[in-house]
Amino acid sequence: MQKILSKIGAGFIGAVMTGATLLAPAMAADLSDYPAPFVTDGTTDMLMVVGAAASPADVVGAINVAVRLGAEPGEEIAVSGDSVTVTGGEDKEIALDTALNDTTAWGNALDDGDLAGFLDTKVEVNDTDYDIKEELSFTGDAIIVSGFDDEDYGSDIVLETSNEGAVIYKYVFDDPIPHAEITSDEPLEINFMGTDLEITSIDEDDITLSMATEYYLVNGESVTVSGKTVVLDGVGETSVRVKVDGTTGTVGEDHTETINGIKVELEKGDIFYVDEVSQRSATLNIGEETTKSYNEGDGIVPLGEPEDGDDAKWVWEFGDDGANNLTYIAALYNVQADDADEEVIALGESLVSPNNYFSVELASATTEAYADYTISFDEVDFKVGGGELDDVPAMILKSSLEEGFTVAGADAAEVYMIWNDSVDTTLYTYYKDKDGDYFNGSTLANINVSTDTLVDLVNEDTTINVWVDVNATNSTNNVRLENKALSTDDINLAIGYNTAGKPTHLGVTAEEAAAADLKYNAKNIGTYDEDFRTVYGVIVKEPENNADQDEVELSIPEEQVKVNVIIKGPGTTTSTTTGATVKSVIPIKDNIARLDTDAEVESAKGSKNMIIIGGPAVNRLTAAVLGLSYPTYGVDSTVPENAAMVKLVENAFGGGKIAYVVAGWEAANTGAACSVLQQYDDYSALTGTGVKVSGTATPYEVTALE
């Protein structure tokens, strides 16, 4: 995949790390002091240098190192509760009933400037470079909802995708590529959502991929493909003999043959023919299929999806500019989930792409602090203001807070409201304070229209006004709870009266729930079985059960409930700190990443500590710091064979600064060494002035460098 990326722009990794918190350098001569001396207290003294000729894997490795450095804590500050730090990703507080493409969320597509590890580089086709970038975007069908949207959600908060295609990953060609330029001889090679693709043909409707794996085999050598043993059994000047589980066939140049169910392709020029039979070799493309075509809307099989688009979560889409030029290749999230029985994303869950390349997480609600309120009907009997109420029907408001109400500005523990259903009636409000004393509240005459009673339900930043609506024909007798912060978040209670016209129950019939007993805006919710959550976040508890008892129970949050939504790319990291103190975040403003060919690198020698990624075959600085000529390959490179090294070089270019050389025998080995630096606190053997990194997956083996 050497064609995936051409030269990476000098600011690429630096842009990835903008806004990170870094630990600044203190002079050190031992690997165990890492991440010093590169970063300390938010001040950088370093350059990270990648070879202009390096593999894309070296760039990925550098990103991994940079992201971890960016997550290093700086100065301690005091906090309360849990604190989540997201580095190289996006996190926002999103209100309920908000689509992810809203201007308060992510109205514009996310790219490499938002998500660490997303690409912004070049690809090469037929000796021409084309600018590309990766993007993630949403439609209005990706929306955060609760019971206000669907009764079955109750008070749960979920992310719906109410239509297919609500989440869109795009591999965008800023420079459109003519379809005719992409052929089997000049394929387009890309890394698509973390998976390598070799595209041999594409248009506005379909795509053809190379499905075979390339193998270089010496005469007599074998590989296992799809459970079958494939042997290069003979090499001629223009053809080869291949044996598959004992079945022999011949493949000529520029031909593909099926041998015992396995397809073998031999491209022209891929035979190495010499007189010595044992030294003859060939490069073969081998697989159950050598190419495979897919239509737009098919499942993306290379990402692990079934081919049938009806069964796939991610399907193909292709962009065309109308002039037979490729503008993008997209993966659409092909899931319609708009009720509780489908694949909605619940609070604490994530929508995760194939390869875990990106994710959208509903991490948590912004508040879990609620106060409980009840509204009920009963006769009251107490003395107040020199008078006495004796078995008078009233609407009674109570709270779990010591003082959960205000009445005409005065704090109150309980509230009692008395009126009748006559035209031009008078509303009397009384309240009890936290000490148990009763007071006259407000007296409002002529409440034959919607009237603010001057009674408020108050929990910290949340205030809900109580309004009473009465008219002469009793057709609009109700109590309205009006949210001051969100005018479209009203809860309406239908009021029933006794023969004397006093409020005594909910709805038309006492102790019998009806749909219209409770309304959320215009929605009848009086017979809902489960809790119901409003857009603001108020929870109406078991509406039907409570209405059967002529009660309303509410859980009112101390502020508007929003959702902490975190979007991660392949290089995003998060950390959670609970209580007491956290480390402050200090944005990095300077460019800390360079290519080995940049003029700034030469001027930084001796004045900056350096992390140099890649061996002396691909990085000029590596060669220079190791005292080798550029390029130097193989055993002469001093890089351990089939492994990698992290080597500390003191006074690397003079000036008392140090350099870390992070270099592997192959690109994958370099990536392993970068992972060790990224996870340095898991490797106690990272010590001394040099270590060898072995293995193909974490945890890697780290030993002293010989």
Image (cartoon, rainbow, N blue to C red):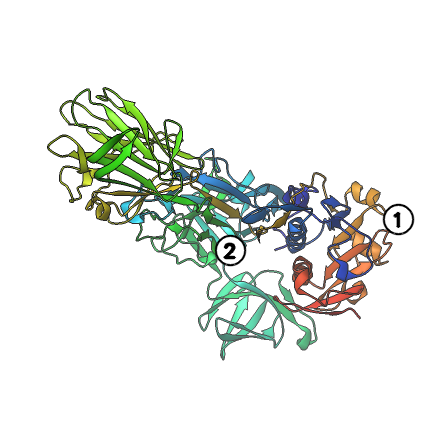
Where residue 591 appears, as percent x and y from the top left, is 72, 41
Q: Using the image as rendered, state which of residue 234 and residue 308 is in the foreground.
A: 308
Q: Are marks 1 and 2 in contact (CB under 8 Å)?
A: no
The quarter in which the C terminus is drawn is bottom right
Q: Using the image as rendered, state which of residue 232 and residue 367 is in the foreground.
A: 367
Marked residue nearer the N-terminal end (1 or 2): 2
- Under circle 2, the secondary element is helix
Read off the residue under disc 1: 655
**Residue beneath the point at 32% across and 28% down:** 441
Q: Using the image as rendered, state which of residue 411 and residue 594 is in the foreground.
A: 411
Q: Toward which corner of the image does residue 318 lie, by quadrant?
A: top left
Query: Image check: 116 left or right of 330?
Result: right
Q: Tell me which amino acid carries mark 2.
A: Asn
- Neighbor class of circle 2 (other Cα within 10 Å; few <14, some 14-19, many 20+) is few
Please tell me the numbered disc located at residue 291: none
Residue at the extreme right: 654
Read off the residue under disc 2: 356
Where residue 381 appears, as percent x and y from the top left, is 23, 37
Foreground label between 1 and 2: 1
Where residue 132 appears, as percent x and y from the top left, is 58, 42
Q: Toward which corner of the image does residue 396 lie, by quadrant?
A: top left
**Residue beneath the point at 59% across and 51% down:** 571
Image vertical order of residue 598 relative to residue 59, above or below: above
Q: Tell me which amino acid carries mark 1.
A: Gly
Query: Image check: 691 left or right of 436?
Result: right
The answer to whether residue 187 shows anywhere in this view is no
